């Protein structure tokens, strides 16, 4: 399709505007992970950084680390006096990400907790950790409703919760949606029904396809 070519041209233009350095490029292009290439785009990484800086976030929680690409963007936003906790199922991915975080110079203020995020996030709740200012939910989509619930236990008013992959090539609205797509749809419905949350959802196109993200602002 001819429009794919144009999407690629704008990917290139907008990626250049993100001004990645070598450690970011290394994390984004890493093949030493379970699913290479599913990280956020450079433009979205930059947007996560901007959201975190603009909201004054000091503590960030991430569901789904992969090679640490989005993690680096978020860690640089909070700076060395901040903290990023990233939850990752796969040990190999976590080890790969650790290397990229060290190379990016942010390793000392990022923790990667290895294991199912349902378990590690429950541990954070039990431990009574200080609230997070921004949460990025980007792990297995079937569990998105649970991760949103956990995020509400781990944040307070003023927090931002960002959901990735809210379109999934249109599958999120398919009548016979797969469990991942159903999870996304349910999380959006939960957010919509929750008076504590104000939802801004946007769809995106790129050479990677048709997708989208949502920014939930916790108003209460
Ligand atoms: N946020 C990353 C991309 C994450 S890809 C970026 O943009 O750079 C999704 C990640 O979620 C993968 O690394 C996958 O291993 C992880 N994941 C899948 N199921 C999980 C689970 N149950 N608990 C924690 N992490 C999970
Ligand atoms: C997939 C997961 C993601 O988080 C993403 O941004 C793109 C694709 C996937 O599992 O296919
Ligand atoms: Mg994603």
Image (spheres, grey):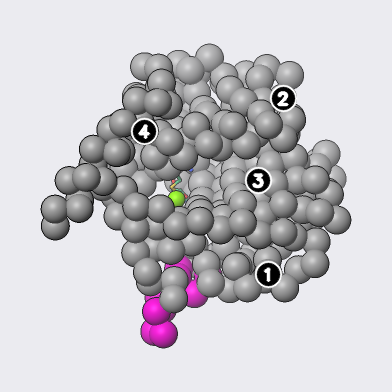
Say the numbered circle drawn on residue 82.
2
Quadrant in which residue 146 is drawn: bottom right
Front: mark 1 or 4: 4
Can residue 131 be seen by looking at this rendering?
Answer: yes
| First of labels 3, 2 by sequence position | 2
Badge 4 element: helix
Residue at x 67% of width, y 54% of height: 216
For disc 3, does the CB lie below 8 Å from ligand 1? no
Number of residues whose C-alpha sits closer than 10 Å to that of mark 1, classed few (under 14), some (14–19) or many (20 or more) = some
Residue under label 1, please give it.
Answer: 192
From which residue to which does the magenta span run? 174-183
The reply to whether the C-beta atoms of the residues labelled 3 and 2 are less than 8 Å apart is: no
Residue under label 3, please give it.
Answer: 135
Q: Position of residue 187 (x, y in %)?
A: 60, 67
Q: CA distance from mark 4 to mark 2?
A: 28 Å
Front: mark 1 or 2: 1
């Amino acid at each position: 399709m001819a429009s794919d070519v144009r999407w690629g041209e704008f990917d290139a233009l907008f990626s250049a505007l993100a001004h990645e350095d070598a450690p970011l490029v290394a994390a984004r292009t890493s093949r030493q992970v379970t699913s290479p290439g599913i990280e956020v785009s450079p433009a979205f990484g930059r947007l996560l950084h901007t959201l975190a800086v603009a909201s004054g976030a000091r503590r960030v929680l991430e569901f789904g680390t992969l090679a640490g690409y989005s993690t680096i963007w978020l860690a640089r936003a909070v700076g060395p006096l901040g903290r990023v906790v990233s939850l990752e199922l796969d040990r190999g991915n976590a080890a790969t990400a650790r290397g990229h975080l060290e190379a990016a110079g942010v390793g000392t203020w990022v923790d990667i907790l290895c294991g199912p995020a349902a378990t590690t996030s429950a541990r954070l709740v039990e431990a009574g950790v200080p609230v997070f200012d921004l949460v990025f939910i980007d792990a297995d989509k079937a569990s998105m409703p649970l991760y949103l619930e956990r995020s509400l236990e781990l944040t307070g008013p003023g927090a931002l919760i960002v959901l990735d992959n809210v379109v999934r090539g249109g599958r999120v609205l398919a009548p016979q949606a797969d469990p991942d797509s159903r999870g996304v749809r349910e999380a959006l419905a939960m957010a919509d029904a929750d008076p504590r949350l104000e939802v801004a959802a946007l769809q995106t196109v790129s050479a990677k396809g048709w997708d989208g993200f949502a920014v939930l602002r916790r108003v209460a």
